[in-house]
Image: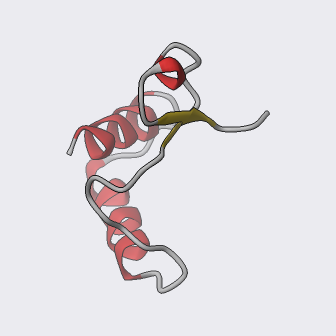
Amino acid sequence: MAALDTLEWVLRSRFGFDKPAFIELLAKLLSTTELAFAAGRAPLWTFDRTAARCVGARAVPA
């Protein structure tokens, strides 16, 4: 759930998405067959270098 909150915050505050646009994007992401969503699946990929040092996390390559 925290990942969705972060995604919403980034898209709305940094990219100007309004709530309906975010909901539409989320619906499209969830219906995409190329993506798999599984809670608790390792590793946790992050752009945050500090978070990448946590156990089970990895930094997204630059």
Give the quadrant of residue 34: bottom right
Q: Nearer the viewer, residue 19 or 57?
A: 57
Give the quadrant of residue 36: bottom left
- Farthest residue toward the right? 62
Give the quadrant of residue 48: top right
Q: Position of residue 35 (x, y in %)?
A: 49, 74
**Quadrant of the snapshot with the C terminus:** top right
Q: Position of residue 45 (x, y in %)?
A: 52, 42
Residue plotted at (41% across, 27% down): 55
Q: Position of residue 14 (x, y in %)?
A: 50, 29
Q: Nearer the viewer, residue 8 or 43?
A: 43
Residue plotted at (20% across, 46% down): 1
**Colouring style:** secondary structure
Residue plotted at (43% across, 22% down): 54
56 sits left or right of 23 in the view: right
Q: Is residue 13 placed above or below 40 in the rendered structure?
A: above
Q: Position of residue 32 (x, y in %)?
A: 46, 81
Residue plotted at (53% across, 25% down): 52
43 sits left or right of 9 in the view: right
Q: Nearer the viewer, residue 52 or 31?
A: 52
- Farthest residue toward the front? 55
- Farthest residue toward the bottom? 33
